[in-house]
Image (cartoon, helix red, strand yellow):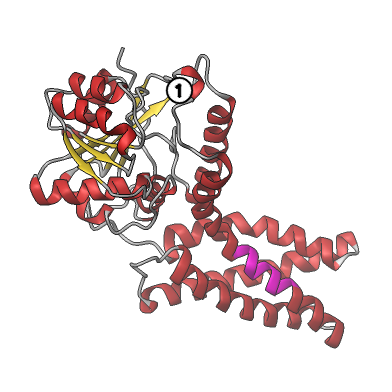
Amino acid sequence: MLIPAYQPDHRLAHLVERLNRHQVLVVDDGSGPPYAQAFEEARRAGAEVITLPTNRGKGFALKTGFAHVAARYPGEDVICADSDGQHRADDIEAVAERLRTTPAAMVLGVRRFTGPVPARSRYGNAATRVLFRMITGLAVTDTQTGLRGYPARMLGRLGGVPGDRFEYELRLLLRAARERLPVEEVGIATVYLEGNRSSHFRPVIDSARIYGPLLAFAGSSLLAFAVDAALLAGMVALTGQLATSAVAARLVSATLNYSVNRSAVFGGGERVPHRRALPRYAALAVVSLTANVLLLRFLTSATGSLAIGKVITEAALFLAGFAVQRMFVFHRRSSATGTPIATARQPAGTRR
């Protein structure tokens, strides 16, 4: 059981006591001397405690814990839980049990957000869930849950995912979606104590960190759209040839889009080889170009406006183009399972 903790209270030791059937590792994320007593109580309750000298963020604390478990307890699975009392012991056990009985690369303890839930948590999670599914195609009920289980085989890979703060856990989901890793869900209780006052989540800064990785998926296409639109408008003004200008503009923007998607959006540290991705992208570009020209001609004629026709055309082709790139052009088989799995399984039920 891995518990990252920053400035915890007495609830940390109580959680450790309830998990006494397991080896518990607590990572003190630079909480400082005023919180030494809380960590000493956790030690007395049976936890092993690692203390970081300065606050580095939840993601860094998790990666520190993963590395420690892999080195000291090889072959052991890991369940991650928060230190603020929001995860009940029986829900943690339910995630652990599912991890033991499934080949999943990740098990999520997902909240249902029923009852008295702070508005920022309810609507923030709903917005992230919808955006995440639109962009990745992976249906995840609770993208921001801190209760997660990881099999031992995944620990080495988790350390290579970028991010040191709250965005790290979302990046793990993005990696799972990108690589078609199997993700399981277990329904858990939604618990917010004292209006979630103990949370160290900073709404503006940490929301920007969380949504940043998601928006990177869409940013490349928007950049290509801007370049394409600017080139199209300029070339039509110079030549008066709509079809020729659309082809030339699309070739330039497609080259840019391919490069950015392969290196920054879908690639990361494991880029798909050119020999595989480039022919697929070229085939997509040909189909997209044909559809773009035909649809643009029709809409420009129907609306009498090149600008309106261009916007409608790009909006119509955006989601289809992204889905094909995600699922075919830049798709990689999971090295963990060897088999692509497209969607998360839905919760089998909530432990009472």
Asked if residue 341 lies left or right of residue 74, the reply is right
Determine which residue is flagged by label 1.
Answer: 112
Residue 232, above or below 288: below
Can the viewer see residue 74 in this picture?
Answer: no
Q: Along the line of sight, which residue is nearer the eye, 24 or 303?
A: 24
Q: Residue 282 location, x and y as percent?
A: 51, 76
Q: Which stretch is magenta?
A: 221-229
Magenta stretch, main secondary structure class? helix
Q: Residue 56 location, x and y as percent?
A: 36, 50
Residue at x 11% of width, y 52% of height: 71
Residue 108, above or below 195: below
Asked if residue 259 lies left or right of residue 247, the reply is left
Residue at x 38% of width, y 52% of height: 164
Can the viewer see residue 227 in this picture?
Answer: yes
Q: Along the line of sight, which residue is nearer the eye, 242 or 270?
A: 270
Asked if the stretch drawn in magenta spans residue 275, the answer is: no
Residue 285, above or below 146: below
